Amino acid sequence: MRGGFLALLLLVAWQAGVELFRPPSFILPAPSQVAAALWSERATLLANAGVTLEEILLAVALSAVVGVGLAVAMRMSPRFAGGAYPWLVASQMFPTVAIAPILVLWLGYTLAPKVLLAVLWSFFPLVVSTYDGLGRVDADAEELFASWGAGRWRRFRALEWPSALPAVFSGLKLAVAFSVSGAVVGEWLGAQAGLGYLIQRYSSQLQASAVFAAVFLLAALGIGLFALTGRVERRVLWWLRTAQDEIGREEA
């Protein structure tokens, strides 16, 4: 509610500022002009938004598989973790903008380079948060499982994985946010469709209102996917919310 009020306040201030100072429309259009562009270009915007959405969803899915898989493997094998962790950190030191043209050269103007670039942006926070979450196990619960003679995989399934789920979802929400940026950068550097491609095209034609319309639609995609992930998290982690509510009632 407060966020919606703040957004409305910013739009009113933006509209008033444009009417007061009258900057050229190709530099800063008014919100009313952006809304008009959203309507007039709706078919083109929606068609290209579908392309970007496909890239984001594929990137998030691949990041989840790769990130969670690596984190689990590192948790199960400390030796593997010692060798893999420095390489994971090093993978984030390479400028992904420089890698994008190479991916386009290898894979062409297809979906693959954009998805791979988005994965490079988004998988790292998911690996780190999941790995850290798997290591945050209650010591008393761990001792209890050990006294029962529970094997390694049983402790993982019944103790470590449930304990790590909040961290997994935190990493997943970060992956969603980063994959949006990764997909757009990939489209900027080599694409024939997508919102990033449209932003470049409209910018070269000095259609600032259409650029803002594409940016707003891209932001709406990211916010919607982030909110959807949060909703899934609340559904999956209902037991955690129930426990927190009970603790709050006891403390009160």
Image: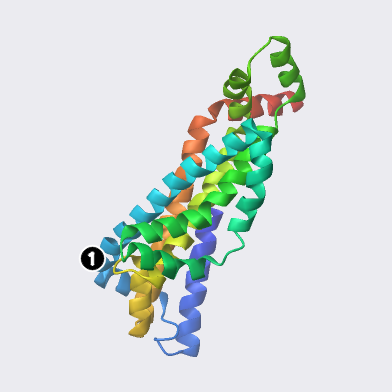
Identify the residue shown where x is 59% and y is 39%: 71
As drawn, the residue found furthest toward the top would be: 148
**1 or 120: which is nearer to us?**
120
**Residue that extends furthest to the left in the rendered view of this protein:** 43
Is 33 placed left or right of 160 in the picture? left
Q: Is 198 left, or right, of 22 in this rendering?
A: left
* Residue indicated by mark 1: 43
Badge 1: few (under 14), some or many (20 or more) residues near its Cα, within 10 Å? few
Q: Is residue 70 above or below residue 186?
A: above
Q: Nearer the viewer, residue 193 or 216?
A: 193
- Side of 189 relative to 70 (left or right): left
**Which residue corresponds to the image point at 52% horizontal and 38% vertical from the top-left?**
69
Classify mark 1: helix, strand or loop. Answer: helix
Label count reads: 1
- Foreground of the two, 248 or 125: 125
Point 66% across, 44% down: residue: 83
Residue 26: x and y, percent? 39, 86
Please name the residue shown 72% across and 20% down the image: 142
Residue 129 seen in the figure: yes
**Residue 34 shows in this picture:** no
The foreground one among 109 and 203 is 109
Task: Give the quarter of the figure containing the C terminus.
Answer: top right
* Above or below: residue 130 compared with residue 14: above
Q: Position of residue 226 (x, y in %)?
A: 48, 49
Q: Position of residue 182 (x, y in %)?
A: 47, 61
Tell me the kind of residue under disc 1.
Ala
Q: Residue 129 occupies which quadrant of the picture?
A: top right
What color scheme is it? rainbow
